[in-house]
Image (cartoon, helix red, strand yellow):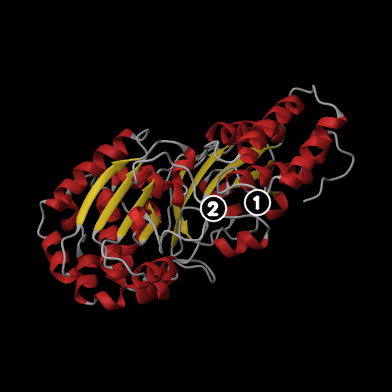
Amino acid sequence: MEKLNQVLLNPALQVGPDLAAWLQAGGGLGLQAALNAPTTIIRQIADADLRGMGGAGFPAWRKWEATANAVGDNKYVVCNGNEDEPGTFKDRTLLSASPHQVVEGALIAALAVRAACVIFYINPHQGQSLQHMRLAVSQWQDSPWLDKLAAALGHPLAIKVVASSGRYIGGEETAVVASLEAGFPFPRKKPPFPAEQGINGQPTLINNVETLANVSHILRHGAAWYRALGVGKAGGTKLYSLSGDVLRPGLYELPMGTSLQELVFHYGGGMLQGKAFKAVFTGGPSNTLLTARDLDVALDFDSVWLRHSRLGTGAMIVISEGSSIIRKVAEYIDFFAKGSCGQCPSCKCGTFQLARLLDRVDGGRHSHADLDALQHLCQILPGSGRCGLIDGAVTVVKSSMHTFPQEYGLTAPAEA
């Protein structure tokens, strides 16, 4: 089946933890270009408009610049591979099939911010990803590249692989810092941001696996090449994790800005059993639902935001007519309730209460008072936690009540 503009999933680069094969396929050229002109790296990342692919879509260069400008003798770069959200399965593919493009991107980032240590923070539940990254990193440690980097930096560069806690909340960037400081992955209030004060109080750059995997290609081919891969104003490619009620679920690398219609009905083969498209959970289960009227939306960060949702990780969980939205929402809120770290009572108790009420609604055992309680919780809980978990949980509940009020037995849409 046709797949357009493959960069990260280019079959020639799927060499596993084999550094020699990676270099044979053109690996190392991006790192060499960075070594030749280290002061231009951040500008090239900015010109490419590389976004953070872990969820927020924040311009990568801003984090890089903040870390580079921060004062610290032992800066860190962390590759966040804690991927644990329902419907998202892109990072584990990159880590398993092509770990060296992730390592090379992280090394370029280390050169840009003048880091002393690179850490690959990998979900232990993804056993092959963890194994392949350890093998890949050991090969870089035995290669001449680290000597070249040490010479350019003026100090040695350590690289290592660390298993994360495996908890969903452990992927939040301040929780990453807490975990790597040998503690429980409790999120922390920001500011300070990790770029200012991260691991052991040192400036720390934290980027998602997919973000870093793009870096060597940008340095090798140039920012203009990368931008031209996208559609419209969007640049580059995006990994879309397509799942749910489609004929061909899977991981698709397509131009950033590909329409939802094209992803679902061309690449995904359309709906199962010929059913009609009902809705999609975008970027995982913590965003506003999009419906059939949004099939024309371009799947890039800005366009999806204009539809009052978020592209997030690029996960697209498709729901067909005849399937219960409430049941899916109840499943996801139960996931959030179990994933809450318990640090903030409003989050721990709030997600538990949301899950309890949704289970009653799904089972048809609810009262009008239960619906009132759901709407009241959605009003008072946002902004009450140290991280975005409770906000994401509320967002999807509010969206489902507003978009599909009839499933809740409401006579009018709930407040969005």
Let me know if residue 9 appears in the view. no
Identify which amino acid the numbered label 1 is placed on: Gly
Identify which amino acid the numbered label 2 is placed on: Gly
Q: Earlier in the sequence, mark 2 or mark 1?
A: 2
State the residue in front, 174 or 227: 174
Residue position for label 1: 383
Q: Position of residue 167 (x, y in %)?
A: 45, 36
Q: Secondary structure at mark 1?
A: loop
The quadrant where residue 404 appears: top right
Q: Residue at x 39, y 71 (%)?
A: 65
Let me know if residue 68 appears in the view. yes
**Residue situated furthest right in the rendering:** 411
State the residue in front, 46 or 382: 382
Q: Residue at x 64, y 47 (%)?
A: 391
Is 357 placed above or below 187 here? above
Q: Position of residue 401 (x, y in %)?
A: 77, 42
Residue position for label 2: 312
The quadrant where residue 346 appears: top right
